Image: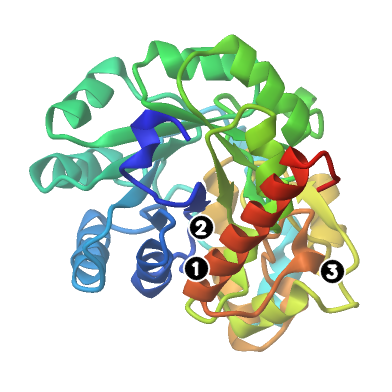
């Protein structure tokens, strides 16, 4: 593991920050206590909500942890396209007996306020999604002793991450569940992402900072593979989504291995930005028509997703999941870290002996 990361995590295992209530303090603490790097997701929370979770996490562990921020998004959405999509979703609102959300509910996710909190009361690691933070932001976090990670989905994006001064780049392959962390939302590039092993190799040759591999990783042998490809650590999301401490809805956890949900797809149906989820009725019916409009569509569909969850209807929920979802294990998060570390050690032994992973 890179020397920049060795003090943060005994095992090269990072729990991905999953917004929407999944990455709760109990999950992050369990991962940290087991020797991984747990993360809180500040996305879709207020600055105070983020701060309260940080306080709670500090009460559960003295180990290093991270907080993830969403970068503010430019106003590129076509309001007319959002209006058309809202009309299409009117039937969903009637079915779930709720109102559609206001697509103009905000674009910056409280970014400046959250940064102010993290500079006033620093945490060990801050990571960024949906773009590259300004160099002065990275420098200010460094001044208070915070390590910084930034997601990239191409070698070109990884070079931009290195230029901004970040300590590590999270190389996110197209296999990853949830939102792709592309720096610019280009509809013409939908589905054209790079697979993780190819991406890690490309990023490793493009930058000199440590690489954290993310996307479809569910087993210790896969961690060994990305480390062999040049990564310093692996970030896992879906693997931790099914754990006991995860804040995911019970239907979401069950869907990961439910034979009813046979595959995943990248879709704009729920948020207006490409995100990988289990294919359900909502995704099939609305995905082909959803506009490139994030976070407008996210705000628009939020009441629908909440109502579907309340009604116990997984067919109307955003069931974010990576391509490895079938390999999900319902374990306590700390135990999962231990199992992954043991699998990694076995795979490394096999590799050194000339065997197969």
CA gap, disc 3 to disc 1?
22 Å
> Residue placed at 81% from the left, 34% from the top?
191
- In x, y percent, where is residue 132? 43, 24
In the figure, residue 148 lies in which quadrant? Answer: top left
Quadrant in which residue 184 is drawn:
top right
Q: How is the image coloured?
A: rainbow
Q: Is residue 292 visible?
A: no
Residue at image coords 25%, 45%: 124
As rendered, which of 84 and 72 lies closer to the eye? 72
- Disc 3 designates what residue? 281
Query: Up-down: is 37 above or below 308?
Result: above
Position of residue 356 in the picture relative to residue 249 (left or right):
right
Q: Position of residue 249 (x, y in %)?
A: 58, 79
Q: Earlier in the sequence, mark 3 or mark 1?
A: 1
Relative to 248, is 205 above or below? above
Query: How many C-alpha atoms fall within 10 Å of the one at disc 3: few (<14), some, or many (≥20)?
Result: few
Spatial CA span between label 2 and label 3: 23 Å
Residue depicted at x 65% and y 88%? 311
Q: Which residue is mark 2?
A: 18
Estimate the spatial distance between the alpha carbons at disc 2 and disc 1, rounded to whole Å. Answer: 6 Å
Marks 3 and 1 close (CB-CB < 8 Å)? no
Label annotation for residue 22: 1
């Amino acid at each position: 593991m890179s020397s920049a990361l060795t003090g943060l995590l005994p095992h090269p295992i990072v729990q991905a920050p999953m917004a929407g209530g999944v990455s709760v303090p109990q999950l992050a603490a369990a991962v940290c206590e087991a020797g991984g790097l747990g993360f809180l997701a500040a996305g879709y929370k207020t600055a105070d909500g983020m701060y309260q979770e940080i306080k709670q996490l500090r009460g559960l562990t003295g180990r290093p942890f991270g907080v993830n921020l969403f970068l503010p998004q430019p106003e590129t959405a076509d309001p007319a396209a959002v209006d058309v999509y809202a009309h299409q979703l009117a039937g969903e609102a009637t079915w779930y007996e709720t109102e559609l959300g206001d697509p103009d509910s905000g674009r910056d996710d409280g970014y400046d306020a959250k940064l102010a909190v993290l500079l006033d009361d620093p945490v060990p690691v801050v990571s960024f999604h949906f773009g590259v933070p300004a160099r002065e932001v990275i420098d200010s976090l460094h001044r208070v002793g915070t390590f910084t990670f930034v997601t990239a989905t191409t070698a070109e994006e990884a070079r931009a991450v290195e230029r901004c001064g970040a300590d590590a780049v999270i190389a996110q392959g197209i296999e990853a569940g949830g939102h792709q962390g592309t720096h610019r939302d280009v509809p013409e590039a939908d589905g054209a992402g790079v697979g993780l092993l190819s991406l890690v190799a490309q990023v490793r040759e493009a930058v000199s900072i440590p690489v954290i591999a993310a996307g479809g990783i569910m087993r210790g042998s896969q961690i060994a593979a990305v480390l062999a490809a040049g990564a310093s650590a692996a970030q896992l999301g879906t693997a931790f989504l099914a754990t006991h401490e995860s804040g995911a809805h019970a239907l979401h956890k069950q869907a990961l291995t439910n034979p009813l949900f046979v595959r995943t797809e990248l879709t704009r149906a729920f948020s207006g930005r490409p995100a990988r989820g289990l294919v359900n009725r909502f995704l099939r019916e609305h995905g082909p028509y959803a506009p490139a409009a994030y976070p407008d569509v996210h705000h628009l569909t939020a009441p629908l997703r909440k109502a579907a969850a309340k009604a116990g209807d997984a067919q109307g929920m955003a069931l974010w999941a990576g391509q490895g979802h079938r390999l999900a294990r319902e374990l306590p998060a700390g135990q999962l870290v231990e199992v992954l570390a043991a699998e990694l050690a076995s795979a490394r032994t096999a590799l050194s002996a000339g065997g197969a992973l």
